[in-house]
Image (cartoon, helix red, strand yellow):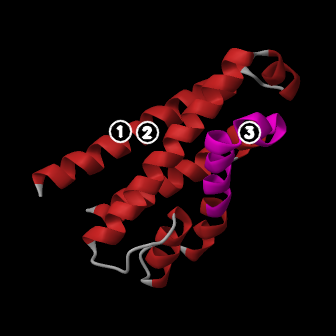
């Protein structure tokens, strides 16, 4: 059990650290024009979104396993399984779908990343991502 606690703790620490960095990055680029001018901020934003989403996916899968639920066949399915078992709010599923889609583009379609979408997430969705992380922390206890 101590090993599991450490694994959860490590994942939450990664997510929270990246969310802090994303908030800082958001303050540095108040406009889209400023965002697209800075390759450094664009790269840092993409990397921190990637790490945040990976940590959230890992946490979701760990909770599914720890609760003895059906093994998910995909990252998305982990959150649907949690929702089906009343462990994850249905209203967060759409955001998780989009986050996992963004992660897939960043990782596999890195040459197709749309700056305007990443900037929109940076400006509009960090609070929601933080809510998901906080919710997962509650149900992981």
- Mark 2 to mark 3 CA distance (whole Å): 18 Å
User: In the image shown, does 108 or 130 lie closer to the viewer?
Assistant: 108
- Taking the magenta stretch, the answer to whether it contains residue 36 is no
- Name the element at disc 1: helix
Magenta span: 97-118
Tell whether 86 sits left or right of 5.
right
Residue at the spot x=43%, y=47% of the render?
Answer: 55
Residue at the spot x=63%, y=49% of the render?
Answer: 104
| Whether residue 75 is visible | yes
Q: Of the residues tagged 2 and 3, which is closer to the observer?
A: 3
Residue 100 position by quadrant? bottom right
Residue that numbered label 2 is attached to: 16
Q: Label 1: how many residues lie within 10 Å, few (<14), some (14-19) or many (20+)?
A: some
> Which dot marks residue 118?
3
Residue that numbered label 1 is attached to: 13
Residue 13 position by quadrant? top left
Magenta-highlighted stretch: main secondary structure?
A: helix
Tell whether 30 sits left or right of 102.
right
Which comes before the other along the chain, label 3 or label 1? 1
User: In the image shown, does 46 or 109 lie closer to the viewer?
Assistant: 109
Residue 106 position, x and y percent, is 66, 40
Tell whether 74 sits left or right of 91.
left
Q: Label 2: how many residues lie within 10 Å, few (<14), some (14-19) or many (20+)?
A: some
């Amino acid at each position: 059990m101590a090993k599991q606690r450490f694994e959860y703790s490590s994942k939450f620490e990664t997510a929270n650290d990246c969310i802090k960095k994303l908030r800082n990055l958001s303050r540095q680029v108040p406009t889209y024009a400023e965002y697209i001018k800075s390759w450094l901020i664009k790269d840092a934003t993409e990397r921190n979104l990637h790490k945040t989403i990976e940590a959230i996916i890992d946490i979701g899968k760990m909770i599914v396993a720890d609760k003895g639920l059906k093994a998910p066949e995909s990252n998305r399915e982990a959150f649907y399984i949690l929702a089906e078992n009343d462990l994850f709010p249905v209203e967060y599923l759409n955001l998780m779908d989009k986050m996992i889609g963004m992660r897939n583009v960043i990782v596999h379609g890195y040459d197709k990343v749309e700056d305007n979408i990443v900037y929109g997430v940076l400006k509009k969705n960090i609070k929601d991502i933080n809510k998901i992380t906080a919710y997962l922390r509650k149900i992981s206890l």
